[in-house]
Amino acid sequence: MRGRERPALIARALCTRAVSADRSLWQVGACLKRGSQLMPQPYMLSCHCGAIRLEVDAELAGLLECNCSTCARAGFIRWKVPVEAVRLVTEKCRLSTYLWHDADGGTHFCPTCGTTMLRTGYRDHIAVNARCLEGADIFEFEVTRYDGRNLMPPGPTL
């Protein structure tokens, strides 16, 4: 372990490091922890420039990385959450939307820095980009891979 020793080491089986700039953020199971205190839900997410911010009040689980043409280009790590668990902290008009494949939903991103924040159009959930979790290192999370390139139906052709 780099840096100073952590008290009790929080049992390696449960704890993975999610390092913030000051090395005080830890993840225990699916719950983020800063120092010795748990970070309460909701979790804060933001784009790279900070213009778009949202809160998610849901368990941090079921992260999925897809290699479809859209996810691969955007670097989207899907975190499916109930619609009611997401609250946009900034103005909705600040989000830009890219519509593809269908007109029911879209990929919503920051028009300033281009960070993909979320996807809508599902019946009972929203897909949030887990890479946007503030202070977390996505390499430390358990992420399942999905072969969207081969398993998803292609989009409309011209």
Image (tube, helix red, strand yellow):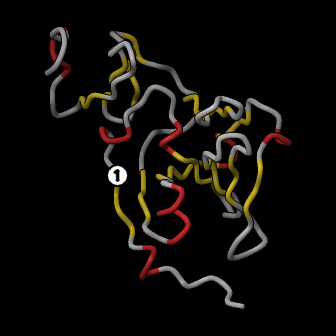
For the view shown, which residue lies furthest in the right direction? 93
Percent coordinates x, y for residue 12 in the rendering: 15, 29
Percent coordinates x, y for residue 141 in the rendering: 33, 41
Examine the rendered structure and indicate whether residue 111 appears above or below residue 15: below
| Residue that label 1 marks | 143
Percent coordinates x, y for residue 61 in the rendering: 42, 45
Amino acid type assigned to the residue bearing label 1 in the image: Val
Task: Name the residue located 61 percent from the left edge and 36 percent from the top edge.
Answer: 47
For the view shown, which residue lies furthest in the front direction? 112
How crowded pointer 1 is (Cα within 10 Å; few <14, some 14-19, many 20+) is rated as some
Q: Nearer the viewer, residue 157 or 133?
A: 157
Among the 4 quarters of the image, the one containing residue 154: bottom right
Among the 4 quarters of the image, the one containing residue 151: bottom left
Examine the rendered structure and indicate whether residue 40 appears above or below residue 127: above
Percent coordinates x, y for residue 23 in the rendering: 32, 16
For the view shown, which residue lies furthest in the bottom direction? 158
Task: Name the residue located 71 percent from the left edge and 62 percent from the top edge.
Answer: 106
Examine the rendered structure and indicate whether residue 81 appears above or below residue 88: below
Identify the element where label 1 is drawn. Answer: strand
Image quarter where the C terminus lies is: bottom right
112 displayed left or right of 67: right
Image quarter where the N terminus lies is: top left
Among the 4 quarters of the image, the one containing residue 31: top left
Task: Name the residue located 42 percent from the left edge and 82 percent from the top edge.
Answer: 150
136 displayed left or right of 52: left
